[in-house]
Amino acid sequence: MSEHPYKSMPDYAFWSRGVARPPAGEVDPVVSAKFKITRNDRVATAGSCFAQHIGRELRRAGFNYYIAEKVHPAFEEAAEGFNYGTFTARFGNIYTARQLLQLLMRVYGLFEPADKIWEERDGGFKDPFRPSIQPRGFSSMAEFYADRAQHYAAVRLAVENLNVLAFTLGLTEAWIDSADGAVYPLCPGVAGGTYDAGRHIPVNFGVTEVVEDLTAAIAFIKERNPAARFIVTVSPVPLIATSQPRSVLVSTAYSKAVLRVAAEQVCASSPDIAYFPAYEVITGNHARGSYFADDLRSVSEAGVAHVMRLFFRHYTDGEIAQSRVDSEDSSDADSAAREHMRAMSKIAEAICDEEALESI
Amino acid sequence: MPVPGKSAPRVGKEKSVLLVGSSHAEVLARSQVSLGSQSLFRLKTILLHAPRYVPWGTWQDGEYSVNPLLMADIARTIRTKKFSHVTMMIGGSTHFELGAVNSPRKFDFLIPGREDLPFTPGAELIPYDLVRQLFLREEKNILKPLFRARELTNAVSCLCAPPPVADAAKIFEHMPDEHRDSARSLGVPPPVFRYKLWLAYTSAVREICQSARIELIDPPPQSIDENGFLKDEFSYDTLHGNARYGAAVLAQIGARIAAEGASAA
C-alpha cells in the first residue's frame, strides 16, 4: 500500500477517531490555541447571548472577567434584570459585526444615529440600541442621556484596557434605519419603539460584509489598544425568527454558515485573532442534539460546561482557581463601598436602638 | 409638650388602635404616654425590638422571613381585641443607610418629574428604577406584618417615615463613636441627596401599600419645612421624630379613625 498524507494525521483529523468514537463530552475540536490567557488578563466579552456564558464561566473559574460598568455595591441585591456584568459593559446583546462596529463608532463620537431615543407609551424612555437593558427603560429623558454618557465612557474604558475580547457572532439578519444605516439589535416595535415599514429595513449580511465589519471593529480596537487579542466564536443558538421569506431553519443554516466562514477568514488574518469552535462543540453530531434544551435553541448547562472545559484546557495554563474572587469585583473602591454599607446598617441599628432605649 | 393640633377630632376613649413597629413606633408610644388624658384613643403597641421577637426579621439565602412568633402575636391580638384601627411603622431606615454619609463610590440618581432636584457633580448615575427596586425589595419583605394585618382587617394603615433633617451636624450627633471618624472623612452628602432618597423610599412604600389596598399616612404637613425637610422642632435625631412629631402623627391617626367612623355612619 502506498504512503499518503492521511497516514500520519492525528486522531482529530478523522471523523471516526475524533468525533464518532469518543464519548460526547470528550470530543475536542480545538486542537491548539493561538495564545494563552493568564488569570491576570482582563477578558472582555461581547456579542450574542451565548457570549454571556463565557463571561459567567470565566468569573466562576477565577479568571479576570473584565467588567467596566459595574453595579454599585449598594444596589447589587436589587440589580437583577439591569444587565450589569452580563457583558463587559451594559451594551446588551450585540448580534452582528456591524452592530459592534457602530457601537465603537458611537462611543467615540464618530457616529450619532438619527434614531436617538424611544419614548414609550408608559412614559419610559428606551435606547434603540439596547432596548432591553433594564426592565422598564429609563425614567426620564435626562436619565437616558446621562446613563448613555456613562455607558459610553465604560465602553471606551474597556476598549482601551482589555487584554482579550471574546466576541460571539450571532446573526447575519438585522434591521437598519434607512435614514443612516444604523443597525438595531432588535426590530423596532419588538422590545420598544414603533415599527415603521418605510424606515426600518431588514438586511441579511453576506460573508464580505461580515468580514469587513469585524475586521474594521478589530482594527478600531487595536488602534486604541495595540496589545489587544481576540477570540471569536459563532453562536450555536438558532435564529428565533427570520425576516426572510423562507423557513427559519434555512435562514439559520445560512446565517451560521456565513458567520463561520467570516470568522475563519478574519481569524486567519492575524495571530492575535483566534477562532474558538464553540459552535461545533454544541451543534456537532457527537452531541446528538443533547446540548440543546427542549426548545431546541437554548444551550444546556452540559453544553456550556463542555465548551468551557475546552476553553480552559487550551486557552489557559489550566490553573483554575475556583476560590479566587474576580479581581475587578474586589477593587478597593468596591470593597470600601460594601464595608461602608455594612457600617451604615450598624449605625442605623445603633441609632434605632438608642431611640428604643430612651423609652426604658 | 404641645397638644395635638386644634383641629384634632375627638375620637372617644372607647376607640383603640394597635400600633406595630420599631423605633419610629416607639416615638409614638412615648407621645401617647405624654398626652395622658388628652390622648385621642387607647393605644396598644407591639414593638419589634421586644426581646421576645429578636431578631424579628432575617435574610437567609436571599429569602426574608419574619419571626413567626411576631406574626402569630399580631394575628392573635387583632383577632381577640376590637381595634378601631391597626397601623404600622416598620423599618424606615434604608434611605438613611444609603445617604447619611458619602459612599466611597459616590452615587446619585434623577427622580422623574423632579428635575428641580440637582444631581451631585461627578457622582455615578444609578438608574432611578434600580433605586426604586432596592426599596421595593426591602420594603416588600419587612412590611410582611402589615400584609398579615390587612388579611385580618380592612382598617389598616402604614405610617410614612419622617423626612430627613437638613442639618448635617445631626447625623454625627447620634452616631456611635467607633464610626464617627470614618464617617467624617467620607463626608456628608448634600441635604437634597438625602431628601431624594427619602422621596424614592416613600414612593416605593406608597406603591406597595396601594397594591395591598393599605393607606399610607404621610408625615404631618406641619412638621415639614418649605424644602421638604423635617423641621428641627419635630426631630429627635437624624432619623426619628420627637415626641411632638409623635403627637402630630397620633392626631393624624385620630383623624383617620374619625373619618372611618363618619363613613361607617
Image (cartoon, rainbow, N blue to C red):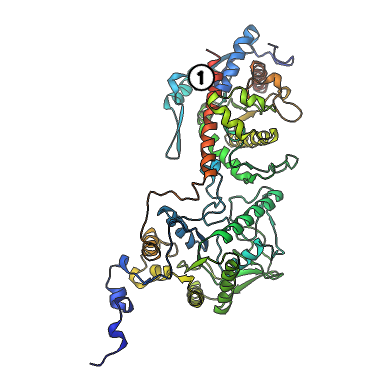
Quadrant in the rendering for residue A312: bottom left
Residue B243 visible in image: yes
**Which residue type carries mark 1?**
Ile
The residue located at (47%, 62%) in the rendering is: A50
Q: Position of residue A95 (x, y in %)?
A: 55, 66
The residue located at (64%, 19%) in the rendering is: B236
Left-right relation of A336 to A129: left
Tell which of A188 and B52 is nearer to you: B52
Residue B21 visible in image: no
Total labels: the figure holds 1
Q: Position of residue A323 (x, y in %)?
A: 38, 48
Question: Compared to B127, does A90 lie above or below?
Answer: below
Quadrant in the rendering for residue B153: top right
Quadrant in the rendering for residue B105: top right
Location of the N terminus of chain A by quadrant is bottom left
Secondary structure, mark 1, is: strand
Q: Position of residue A282 (x, y in %)?
A: 39, 67
Question: Compared to A147, does B220 lie above or below?
Answer: above
Residue farthest toward the left in the current orientation of the protein = A1
The residue located at (64%, 13%) in the rendering is: B40
Tell which of A270 and B197 is nearer to you: A270
Which residue matches tag 1? B46
**Disc 1 residue crowd, few under 14, some 14–19, many 20+, Cα 10 Å:** many
Residue farthest toward the top in the current orientation of the protein = B37
The residue located at (49%, 58%) in the rendering is: A42
Q: Chain of mark 1?
A: B
Question: Compared to B85, does A190 lie above or below?
Answer: below
Left-right relation of B221 to A159: right
Tell which of B109 and B213 is nearer to you: B109
Residue farthest toward the bottom in the current orientation of the protein = A2
